[in-house]
Image (tube, rainbow, N blue to C red):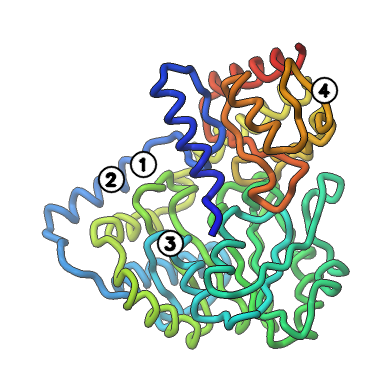
Amino acid sequence: MSTSQTLAMAAKTRELKAEGKDIIGLSLGEPDFNTPDFIKEAAIQAINDNYNSYTPVDGYVELKDAIIHKFKRDNGLTYDRSQVVVSTGAKQSLANVAMVMLNPGDEVILPCPYWVSYAEIVKLAEGVPVEVPTSVESDFKMTPQQLEAAITPKTRMLWYSSPSNPSGMVYSRDELRALADVLVKHPDIIVVSDEIYEHINFVGEHASMAQFEDMYDRVVTVNGVSKAFAMTGWRIGYIGAPAEIARACNKMQGQITSGANCIAQRAVITALEAPVSKIQYMIDRFKSRRKLIIDLMSEIPGFAITEPEGAFYVFPDVSYFFGKTINGYEIKDATDFSMFLLEKALVATVTGDAFGSPNCIRFSYAASETEIEEAMKRIKNALSE
């Protein structure tokens, strides 16, 4: 397996900071907000109420009911308790699905760019990642024609995220319907829809593939609380899925970790039952930061940018710099460019190679306005040399 490039860059950043270097970290997808007080208070109450025992493998009934209510309220999706599994983060949810669904040699279509762990999770389950390239010109969206061309007799699954990590693109309902029209012709393909950034959406209503009646029984909807609720360390994710897939994930999880943390689960009940308006202040800040980083990045020659529609990432094409030597640094690819920015501008990013898009690099704007402004100033100065 490859090491997660986002985690590797974060480790390198911590190492350089320990050496006294003033690194601005724009590599990790981690909100810089504190978890909202009303959620923390629920966790404290759970401790005082002596929640300290093993939890049900697939989650507390009260949390599953809160998830069912959330799916209905926010997505128009109807699930029952047998279709919901709570896990230790959405990453475990994804790994569970891969482990129970994939046989050796099964192909999984991954529109590029994709989240850094998709390919490695698929390979760990002995599946074969099939990359479908997109570009800044297509807003990093896969077309129905590309999907059709990627399908073979070995295709078992399609995985995608919307809003996307790393590109920030958002598939509209019409765009998802066009992809679904291809998939209905191939009834053995299961779809994993990663919706962890659902609420961080700047273009309108969120659409889920499972909303289509002819796809509902073939879609695993993955979500969690890390991003929109600033709860990355609490480690709670969940799925809504066909009952037989949920049962298999429950069995798999029962042999790996068992149930997720008891205190975190009680806090997430409160988080999901609250109206989305309770976290709107964070979404508004992300939107203003998006404008800031796009405006500043647009002033840097050589960056090809598409405006992200959600999440908190910008994913510029930096191939303009390939083959150039900048201040003694030879830039052969995005990895070289990312390391140049780290060593020369003291700004941490992530190479697009990690996401299946070797011409790009990822910036996270889940950082303060001051850090964003200083980071763009440093990059502009480093490249001007």
- Residue 373 sits above or below residue 262 on the image: above
- State the SS at label 3: strand
Q: Are marks 1 and 2 in contact (CB under 8 Å)?
A: yes
Question: How far apart are labels 3 and 4 at the CA level?
Answer: 40 Å
- State the SS at label 2: helix
**At which x and y percent is residue 327?**
73, 15
Q: Amino acid at mark 3?
A: Gly
- Residue 82 sits above or below residue 8 on the image: below
Q: Are marks 4 and 1 in contact (CB under 8 Å)?
A: no
Question: How far apart are labels 1 and 2 at the CA level?
Answer: 7 Å
Question: How far apart are labels 4 and 1 at the CA level?
Answer: 39 Å
- State the SS at label 4: loop
**At which x and y percent is residue 234?**
34, 51
Mark toward the viewer: 3 or 4: 4
- Residue 43 sits above or below residue 192 on the image: above
Q: Tell which circle, 3 or 4, labels the residue nearer the N-terminal end.
A: 3
- For disc 1, the marked residue is 36
Q: Tell which circle, 3 or 2, labels the residue nearer the N-terminal end.
A: 2
Please tell me which residue lies in front, 320 or 83. 320
Q: Quadrant of residue 173?
A: bottom right
Q: Tell which circle, 2 or 4, labels the residue nearer the N-terminal end.
A: 2
Question: How far apart are labels 3 and 2 at the CA level?
Answer: 17 Å
- For disc 3, the marked residue is 237
- For disc 2, the marked residue is 40
Binning the other alpha carbons within 10 Å of mark 4 as few (below 14), some (14 to 19) or many (20 upward) gives few
Q: Tell which circle, 3 or 1, labels the residue nearer the N-terminal end.
A: 1
The mark found on residue 301 in the picture is 4
Residue at position x 51%, y 67% in the image? 94
Binning the other alpha carbons within 10 Å of mark 3 as few (below 14), some (14 to 19) or many (20 upward) gives many
Which quadrant is home to the C terminus? top right
